[in-house]
Amino acid sequence: MDLRIRGKRALVTGASRGIGRAIALSLADFKVDVAINFFRQRGPAEEVARQIEARGARALVIKANVADERHVTRMFEEIHQQWGGLEFLISNAASGVLKPATQLTMHHLHWTMDINALALLPLVQRFLTLPSNGEKVVVAVSSLGAVRAIPNYTAVGASKAALESMVRHLACELAGKGVRVNAVSAGTVDTDALKHFPNREELLEETRRRTPAGRLLTPQDVANAVVFLCTEFASMIHGQTIVVDGGYSILA
């Protein structure tokens, strides 16, 4: 299948594991060069880079905290120096505090909001300064917690709701400048991040039981939607949040 994205260049934040890793490798399958952003563990990021290069695309490994504007600036400077420009920005890096609302502190809220929502703005601002070969595309990775109440998800859910709102506003402002901005909202995916949920097993079982498609979501399912949004076949999709959840959220 030719999606006509061969030779494009992408930055995927939080690309060393889980959904970010699946997105990076899926783009590389279509010969998109991928800059892999990580913050803590270099080993997994370098392994993703090796797999990208094995697919015939270029890889660039960059350590940066997306919640720190100085790190973001350095990251885009390195991409500019190494590759000259960028077409795709995939904002996937996420963190957060999983506690009941009554146990959250302002520090918990600021930490979660800074990484999951507010980081998108400086990422996009720096992205706009880089040259590109044609249209630019931004895709942010969200979750159903933006619109549904999930136990212990108050801080993360609020941050994802803010992220989706920012996507809409950015899309409206940037559409006329040749930039598409959208989000992909993922249902429950059994990644390493889910291991931090105190009710993980209960959540997985409930999701499996209630999902009309009959199975749990995988990182690849989410990556497929992200790749589609990067293509010209999605050229008139602006400011939307595409839900990928096997039908879970359509049930009452």
Image (spheres, rainbow, N blue to C red):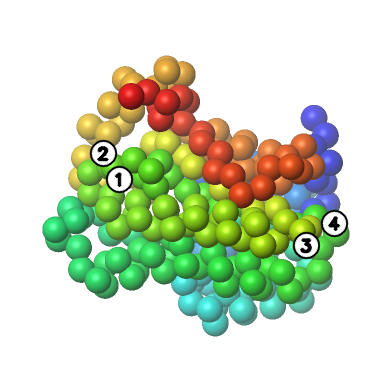
Closer to viewer: mark 1 or mark 3: 3
Q: Residues within 10 Å of mark 2 (few under 14, many from 20)?
A: some
Query: Dot 3: what SS?
Result: helix
Closer to viewer: mark 4 or mark 2: 4
Q: Among all residues in the image, which is located at the extreme left?
A: 102
Closer to viewer: mark 1 or mark 4: 4
Say which label, 3 or 2, has the lower sequence index: 3
Query: Dot 1: what SS?
Result: helix
Q: CA distance from mark 4 to mark 3?
A: 11 Å
Dots 1, 4 in contact, CB < 8 A: no
Is 215 located above or below residue 149 in the figure?
above
Say which label, 1 or 3, has the lower sequence index: 3
Q: Give the labeled residue for mark 4.
A: 134
Is 38 located above or below residue 150 in the figure?
below
Q: CA distance from mark 3 to mark 2?
A: 43 Å
Q: Give the labeled residue for mark 1.
A: 195
Image-based side of 106 in relation to 129, left or right: left
Amino acid tagged 4? Gly
Query: Dot 2: what SS?
Result: helix
Is 60 located above or below residue 208 in the figure?
below
